[in-house]
Image (cartoon, grey):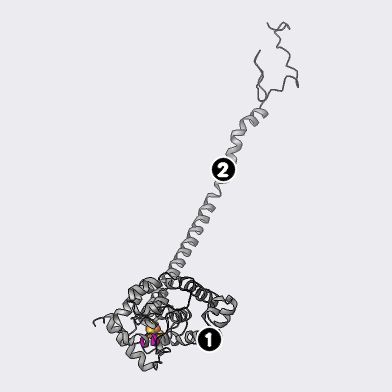
Amino acid sequence: MATPSKAQLLTNVHDLLKKRYKPKADPHPGRLTVLEAVVYGICHEGMTRDAAAKALARFKSDYFDWNEVRVSSLVELQSTLAGFPDSEGRARRIRKFLRQMFQKTYGFTLEVLVKKPLKEALKVLGEYEAFASDFVTATVIQQALGGHGMPVDEEIRRPLARLGINEPDAASLRSTLERAVPKNRGVEFLGLIEDLAHDTCLPGIPECPRCELRKICPYPQQHKDELQAAASHAKSASSKGTAAKEKEIASSAKDRAHAKEAAPAKPAKSASKPATASPPVAAKNAPAAPAPAGAKPSSAKAPKKSEEPAPPPAKGKSGRPRS
Ligand code: SF4
């Protein structure tokens, strides 16, 4: 069977997901301002679009204006982001963006950029730290600048990777999606993928048996193959381990047998040891040979001069000492 192109696969995914999940209305059917889109993008990364839309609404309703958000403490901003992972980091990014904007424009509007060509607008926005995030950049393009932007975070990347749409980074995946999914279906497509990511295509072990995409998704079969390969690897490793253990046992038994055989030779070795020592013993027990005249006593056995007097000189038949 021919492999469908990425565009065809994504169209199939879109159609199947529409059967499973009711496409939700765009939380911002009108356009957001650039400032609002940045705040929304920071809140949306790794979160649902509903949670992000509610957080943006709280920033707009709980504070007098954006200047009050700019001068608020991180703790206050974090309370507006209660329930968000890394609320401190998000609060810091929002406040930093507002501070940078105030320093550059003495105000809180960047709407002049909407009328500029997209490339030019993005060049200006690239000076803000918030735009280091590709997710925020794509959100602003989609929600504020009227371009075709497909923000990709982990919740979007995970199901697409399992479906076989793999790219080395978020920016590459974004450009693949922007080429394959038409602009007028972009928001709905991402909303459906987000629903999938929070329903069956969960982090860790996905719940494929109840997924609408299980017939076109390669992941369940790949995962099954991987599990089988891992099981057979573990089995062969365990049988190799058993064989090695048996070999080790046999080898140690052989060593013990050799040691046993070698054991009787030990006394012979110890008997031969005295053999080297025996001459002195034998010499000790044997009757002492008469010392030749004038011979020096043996250095090993002869008593020391100071301890034992030298034997009297041998006498001749005449009884005189020999000269
Ligand atoms: S079949 Fe499984 S891995 Fe594939 S998209 Fe559905 S839940 Fe995710």
Mark 2 vs mark 1, foreground winner is: 1
Reply above or below: 266 against 96.
above
Residue occupying the far left of the picture: 2
Q: Position of residue 173 (x, y in %)?
A: 35, 76
Residue 190 on the magenta segment: yes
Residue 68 falls in which quadrant of the image? bottom right
Give the distance between the C-alpha atoms of the residues marked 2 and 1, in whole angstroms: 98 Å
Q: Earlier in the sequence, mark 2 or mark 1?
A: 1
Regarding mark 2 in the picture, which secondary structure is present there? helix
Regarding mark 1 in the picture, which secondary structure is present there? helix
Q: Where is residue 146 in the image (x, y as percent from the top left)?
A: 35, 82
The front one of 150 and 1 is 150
Left or right: 212, with 83 as reference point: left
Left or right: 247, with 296 as reference point: left
Reply above or below: 241 against 314.
below
Is any part of residue 82 visible from this angle? Answer: no
Residue 297 on the magenta segment: no
Quadrant (top left, top right, bottom left, bottom right) of the N terminus: bottom left
Q: Name the residue under label 2.
A: 268
- The mark found on residue 58 in the picture is 1
Q: What stretch is highlighted in magenta?
A: 188-193
Is any part of residue 109 visible from this angle? Answer: yes
Left or right: 205, with 172 as reference point: right
Residues packed near mark 2 inside 10 Å, few (<14), some (14 to 19) or many (20 plus)? few
Q: Where is residue 103 in the image (x, y as percent from the top left)?
A: 49, 71
Q: Position of residue 270 (x, y in %)?
A: 59, 42
Residue 153 falls in which quadrant of the image? bottom left
Q: Which amino acid does label 1 sit on?
A: Arg
Residue depicted at x 43% and y 69%: 239
